[in-house]
Image (tube, grey):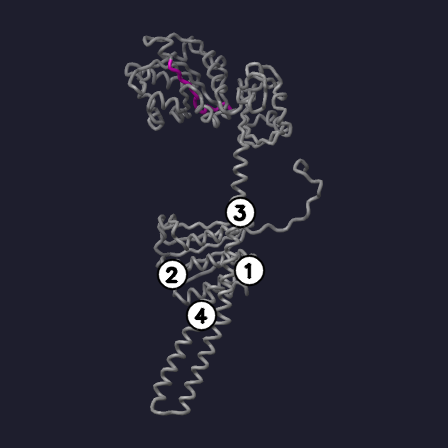
Amino acid sequence: MWLDPGTDEMPSPASALGTLPSSFLASFPGVLEHVPVIAWMTGVDGRCTFTNGQYLMFTGRTFGQASELGWTALLHPDDHDACLAAYLKAHEARTPFHAEQRWRRSDGVYRLVEVSGLPVHDPAGTFQGYVGLCSDVTDQRGAAGAQTSDHVHLVSTNAEEIIANMNDAVLVESDNGRVIMANEAFCRLFQVETPPHELTGMEADRLTKRLNPAVPRIDRLKKARRRSVGEEIGLLDGRVLEQHYAPVARDGAAGMHLWQYRDITARKDFEAELHLSRQRLRNLAAHDEAVREEERRSAARMLHDELGQLLTSVKLEVAAAAGVFREHPDENALSVVDRLQSAAGLLDVCIKTVQSVTAKLRPAPVPEMCISGAIRWEALLFEQRTRIRCRVGVSPPKLEVDSERSAVLYRILLEALTNVVRHANAGAVQISLKKAGGVVFLSVRDNGRGIAQEEIDNPATMGLLSMRERALGVGGDVRITRNARSGTTVMVILPLPPKPSSAVPADYGPGQA
């Protein structure tokens, strides 16, 4: 049976606790998920946008099957057309409704379900949708039919049940600061010994006295009638709460204030611990990179100062020996000279190899010029060596970065260009270096085959892993993406160190402006 909104049996909007404000709508799914009855929500078009777990347990159907108007498949065939038409009529009138319908339960048995719905409007009076509750009343009414109960009592009881069964602390106060309703979670959170049902009529400020530092903010919210979501406030005992506030309108005037609190102390402690852990990881990565750089410099010095000089000396001795044989020719001298000249050529190759390895271990441009000049130099060498066209853009033209980040950018650039040669099969590379808003950006983009997603996600890809580790050491990030048409882009994002600020007066505190 559906109670037509046009009949005398239909309760008026005012008698049904007024119209729920739209500010309540955003946080309502989280609230409705914990109520002990079936709960649902619709949008402005009347189609279902939310069902809670109780609906899924009762019907055995997923939300996808309930969305839109899928819930009508639960109706008894004899009731389907009439119930749907009456629902659409109530929706078009934007009025509260009450109905008793036969729903098919998950075991296939039809049960009598009492359905109530309230419209949601924003402060301007624009309709937003419905919030509704359903209860199985078969055992109370009997399967043959149902008698209409007092709708106001039903809605009021359901509202109290919702608040009473919430895990979050909830306080509803009147416009004059008196308590209308509170739940047990509120009493536990604020250490109130009085039972919730005895708090009605008390001054709300007395119950939230542990929020003294936030009272001015609370008063401003109430005066402005402006919804606030997820504001973090502190208790005097050191706990941290997440506060939600919504003004509840009655006939266009704000008559109630709804406060919802959640203890997030453990979450904040975990976030602080996670932040500290990440900072330690960055410090470790930075230390590891510094050690590796020092090892490279040491190896470069050894190769250049010892092995390089040794090979040069050997080359000079070979050249001298060849000269001796030329001055004292005999029948075997020519073959010996040829062998010595061949050895001198091999020594030249060895010396060049040592120079190349030394340059890769300790690239000369970084300590000798700014990072923008180092990148332009490396791009020139890359183009000459590979015949791959390479263009560089720097903004501002003489961009300068501290030595630590310059080394990171340079190493990542070398790795990115190496990957272009090995894997990209590209014909051109575009390098861009920019600094803006306290962040330096390095982009290396090629027009090659494009990296595959599995290559990006592969933890064994040492080159990509190395780039990310280097950036992590200075609190940065490396993002590798496949371009829309072809090619790959490597984007390096490094935050610059903060500039030294002027000293802050000792008497300046967070509560002072």
Q: Quadrant of the N terminus?
A: top left
* Amino acid at pointer 3: Arg
Sequence-wise, the earlier of marks 4 and 3 is: 3
Residue interval drawn in magenta: 124-136
Sequence-wise, the earlier of marks 2 and 1 is: 1
Disc marking residue 354: 4
Query: Disc 4 vs disc 2: Cβ atoms closer than 8 Å?
Result: no
List x then y, in percent, for residue 187. 56, 21
List x then y, in percent, for residue 430. 43, 58
- Estimate the spatial distance between the alpha carbons at disc 4 and disc 2, rounded to whole Å: 22 Å
Element carrying mark 4: helix
Q: Left or right of 92: which side holds 188?
A: right
- In front: label 4 or label 2: 4
- Estimate the spatial distance between the alpha carbons at disc 2 and disc 1, rounded to whole Å: 28 Å
Sequence-wise, the earlier of marks 1 and 3 is: 3
List x then y, in percent, for residue 403. 55, 58
- In front: label 2 or label 1: 2
